[in-house]
Image (cartoon, rainbow, N blue to C red):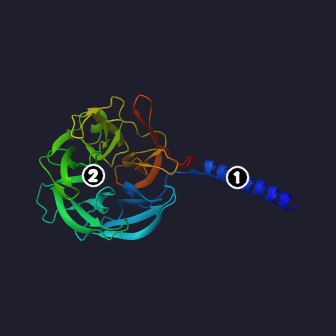
Amino acid sequence: MNQMVRTFTILLLSAAALFAAEVKSTKTYRNPLVGGASFADPHVIKVGQSYYLYATTHTRGYDAYVSTNLVDWENKGSCFDDPRRGAWAPDVFHDAKGDGRFYLYYTDNLPDRKPGGAYKQIGVAVADSPLGPFVDKAVLASDAIDAHLFRDDDGKYYLYYVDLFQGFKIRAQPMRDPLTKQGESTIVIRPTEAWEKISGHVTEGPFMLKRNGTYYLMFSGTGADSPNYGIGYATSKSPLGPFEKFKGNPIVQRGGKVLGPGHHCVIEGPDGKLWNVYHQKWDDKTNFNRFLAIDPIWFDEAGVLHGKATRETDEPAP
């Protein structure tokens, strides 16, 4: 009798496991994930088993959102309040192999606006938790936006950002540590291709990936208020370039209901695959009304990077 009970219990547990696996494999997501009037420029990090999301929302600073699956997000409240306002395009770096702290690179308004100026600066704030509070530490660049910190395998740091002086071009700045610049910056990307110049001459939103010794500097092109906004990349054997743009750019672009996909980051999902976290525009008008989206991004055997963009369709979840 006891043997029959044990056998029946094992069968039940096996059936439950199979059912759970089937449910997990059939779970779907549908863009938009997070809406509102504007939810843009997302950046995601993973700490333990949780994902932390930061984005451009109310421009007075940033809220922190938490998820375990990249699909369902909970707002945990403000992590950085900025009295200067104009805050957008957050990038949070967890120095897990260094001091273990969290570094928020932000864009906000210059304190003294001058006629004809770009009015923007890049600063950095620090916290001991991904939920903040982040405490202001330094201003790293003026007339600049869209900072992204990358730590190479050798422990060296590089800050990529957009220089607004005479156009939207991307610079690479070597860093002594997450707070301190070292040496001179180098222009690594300029708007040279037709797709980058449909609405303004713009290359922005840098994000770095490294694979098999190759540096993939990803970026968004044309104006962010345009439905033609898209994502491309360039490659190099050095984090400081020179970078060669992929001839098949943009790899993520408008199509069907998808409008203005861009300003992204890439993160490994709970499924072990790479996911593109980005924003799309709500409509095809010239504005900054955007929402959060995710979709797969992947390398083929030749090392070519591919992406897709979906909207209002059920897709397999991470």
Residue 37 percent location from the top left of the image: 41, 61
Residue 193 visible (yes or no): no
CA gap between label 1 and label 2 equals 42 Å
Query: Image check: 76 left or right of 25?
Result: left
Q: Of all residues shown, which one is farthest toward the right? A: 1
Q: Amino acid at mark 1?
A: Phe
**Image side of residue 198 versus residue 283, left or right:** left
Q: Is residue 210 above or below residue 7?
A: above
Q: Position of residue 277 (x, y in %)?
A: 42, 50
Residue occupying image coordinates x 32% and y 48%: 224
Describe the element under mark 1 as helix, strand or loop: helix
- Where on the picture, by quarter, is residue 13? bottom right
Is any atom of residue 235 visible in this view? yes
The residue that label 2 is drawn on is 149
Q: Quadrant of residue 197?
A: top left
Q: Nearer the viewer, residue 169 or 176?
A: 176
x and y, in percent, of residue 18 in the image: 70, 50
**Disc marking residue 19:** 1
**N-terminal label among 1 and 2:** 1
Q: Secondary structure at mark 2?
A: strand
Q: Is residue 242 above or below residue 83?
A: above
Query: How would you rate the neighbour count of disc 1 (Cα within 10 Å): few for under 14, some for 14-19, many for 20 or more?
Result: few
Name the residue: 23% across, 34% down.
192
Labelled pair 1, 2 in contact (Cβ < 8 Å): no
Say which amino acid is labelled 2: Leu
Location of the N terminus (image quadrant): bottom right
Nearest the eye: 244 or 168: 244
